[in-house]
Image (cartoon, rainbow, N blue to C red):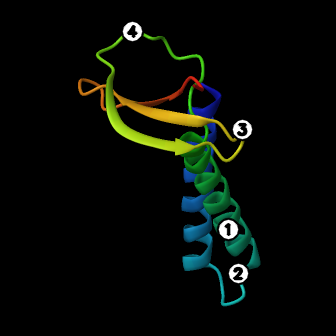
Amino acid sequence: MLRTALLIFSCLLVALGLYLCATLPAPAMGGIQALVSGVVLLVAMLFERWRYRNRNASPEGNWQATGERFIDPETGKQMEVLYDPTSGERRYRELESG
Protein backbone atom coordinates (compact mmCIF):
# COMPACT_ATOMS: atom_id res chain seq x y z
CA MET A 1 0.00 0.00 0.00
CA LEU A 2 2.73 2.46 0.96
CA ARG A 3 4.84 1.39 -2.00
CA THR A 4 1.94 2.00 -4.39
CA ALA A 5 1.29 5.43 -2.88
CA LEU A 6 4.97 6.36 -3.25
CA LEU A 7 5.04 5.17 -6.87
CA ILE A 8 1.97 7.28 -7.67
CA PHE A 9 3.47 10.28 -5.87
CA SER A 10 6.77 9.95 -7.75
CA CYS A 11 4.95 9.73 -11.09
CA LEU A 12 2.97 12.85 -10.20
CA LEU A 13 6.21 14.65 -9.30
CA VAL A 14 7.74 13.69 -12.65
CA ALA A 15 4.62 14.87 -14.49
CA LEU A 16 4.57 18.15 -12.55
CA GLY A 17 8.26 18.69 -13.24
CA LEU A 18 7.80 18.09 -16.95
CA TYR A 19 4.81 20.44 -17.03
CA LEU A 20 6.67 23.21 -15.18
CA CYS A 21 9.77 22.84 -17.36
CA ALA A 22 7.60 23.08 -20.49
CA THR A 23 5.53 26.09 -19.41
CA LEU A 24 7.86 28.28 -17.32
CA PRO A 25 10.62 30.52 -18.75
CA ALA A 26 14.14 29.16 -19.29
CA PRO A 27 15.57 28.70 -15.75
CA ALA A 28 12.58 26.79 -14.32
CA MET A 29 14.29 25.62 -11.14
CA GLY A 30 11.05 24.50 -9.50
CA GLY A 31 10.28 22.27 -12.46
CA ILE A 32 13.78 20.82 -12.50
CA GLN A 33 13.67 20.12 -8.75
CA ALA A 34 10.28 18.39 -9.01
CA LEU A 35 11.44 16.37 -12.02
CA VAL A 36 14.71 15.26 -10.40
CA SER A 37 13.00 14.45 -7.07
CA GLY A 38 10.34 12.38 -8.83
CA VAL A 39 12.88 10.47 -10.90
CA VAL A 40 15.09 9.76 -7.88
CA LEU A 41 12.13 8.50 -5.85
CA LEU A 42 10.84 6.39 -8.75
CA VAL A 43 14.24 4.79 -9.36
CA ALA A 44 14.69 4.15 -5.63
CA MET A 45 11.31 2.42 -5.39
CA LEU A 46 12.01 0.22 -8.41
CA PHE A 47 15.55 -0.60 -7.20
CA GLU A 48 14.24 -1.53 -3.75
CA ARG A 49 11.86 -4.09 -5.24
CA TRP A 50 14.63 -5.62 -7.36
CA ARG A 51 17.40 -5.64 -4.74
CA TYR A 52 15.69 -6.93 -1.61
CA ARG A 53 14.01 -10.28 -1.92
CA ASN A 54 11.14 -11.52 0.19
CA ARG A 55 12.71 -13.68 2.88
CA ASN A 56 9.30 -14.54 4.38
CA ALA A 57 7.70 -15.91 1.20
CA SER A 58 5.74 -19.12 1.54
CA PRO A 59 7.50 -22.36 0.54
CA GLU A 60 4.51 -23.45 -1.55
CA GLY A 61 5.04 -23.76 -5.27
CA ASN A 62 6.70 -25.95 -7.84
CA TRP A 63 10.29 -25.08 -6.90
CA GLN A 64 12.96 -26.58 -9.14
CA ALA A 65 16.73 -26.32 -8.76
CA THR A 66 18.33 -24.47 -11.69
CA GLY A 67 21.84 -25.76 -11.06
CA GLU A 68 23.05 -22.22 -10.41
CA ARG A 69 25.16 -21.77 -7.30
CA PHE A 70 27.00 -18.77 -5.90
CA ILE A 71 28.61 -17.39 -2.77
CA ASP A 72 26.41 -14.79 -1.09
CA PRO A 73 28.58 -11.65 -0.72
CA GLU A 74 26.79 -10.61 2.50
CA THR A 75 27.07 -13.88 4.42
CA GLY A 76 29.84 -15.73 2.58
CA LYS A 77 27.64 -18.86 2.40
CA GLN A 78 27.04 -20.97 -0.70
CA MET A 79 23.54 -20.48 -2.13
CA GLU A 80 21.46 -22.42 -4.66
CA VAL A 81 18.94 -20.84 -7.05
CA LEU A 82 15.41 -22.29 -7.19
CA TYR A 83 12.83 -21.40 -9.85
CA ASP A 84 9.04 -21.69 -9.95
CA PRO A 85 7.97 -21.96 -13.63
CA THR A 86 4.33 -21.13 -12.87
CA SER A 87 5.05 -17.73 -11.32
CA GLY A 88 8.51 -17.02 -12.73
CA GLU A 89 9.77 -16.28 -9.22
CA ARG A 90 13.34 -17.10 -8.24
CA ARG A 91 14.35 -18.01 -4.71
CA TYR A 92 17.69 -18.60 -3.03
CA ARG A 93 18.39 -21.42 -0.59
CA GLU A 94 21.50 -21.90 1.54
CA LEU A 95 23.33 -25.11 0.78
CA GLU A 96 24.38 -27.34 3.64
CA SER A 97 28.12 -27.45 4.33
CA GLY A 98 29.68 -30.83 4.00
Secondary structure of the residue carrying tag 2 is: loop
Q: Earlier in the sequence, mark 1 or mark 2?
A: 2
* Residue 36 marker: 1
Q: Determine contact: label 4, label 1, CB under 8 Å.
A: no
Image location of residue 17, percent across then percent down = 62, 67
Q: Quadrant of residue 35?
A: bottom right
Q: CA distance from mark 3 to mark 1?
A: 35 Å
Check disc 1 and give the amino acid type.
Answer: Val
Secondary structure of the residue carrying tag 3 is: loop
Q: Earlier in the sequence, mark 2 or mark 3?
A: 2
* Residue 28 marker: 2
Categorize mark 1 by other alpha carbons within 10 Å: few (<14), some (14-19), many (20+): some
Q: Nearer the viewer, mark 4 or mark 2?
A: 4
Image location of residue 21, percent across then percent down = 60, 77
Secondary structure of the residue carrying tag 1 is: helix
Q: Nearer the viewer, mark 3 or mark 4?
A: 3
Q: Nearer the viewer, mark 1 or mark 2?
A: 1
Check disc 3 and give the amino acid type.
Answer: Thr
Q: CA distance from mark 2 to mark 3?
A: 47 Å
In the image, farthest residue toward the left:
86
Which sits in the foreground, 65 or 14?
A: 65
Residue under numbered circle 4: 60
Which sits in the foreground, 1 or 21?
A: 1
- Give left or right: position of 40 versus 91: right
Check disc 2 and give the amino acid type.
Answer: Ala
Residue under numbered circle 3: 75
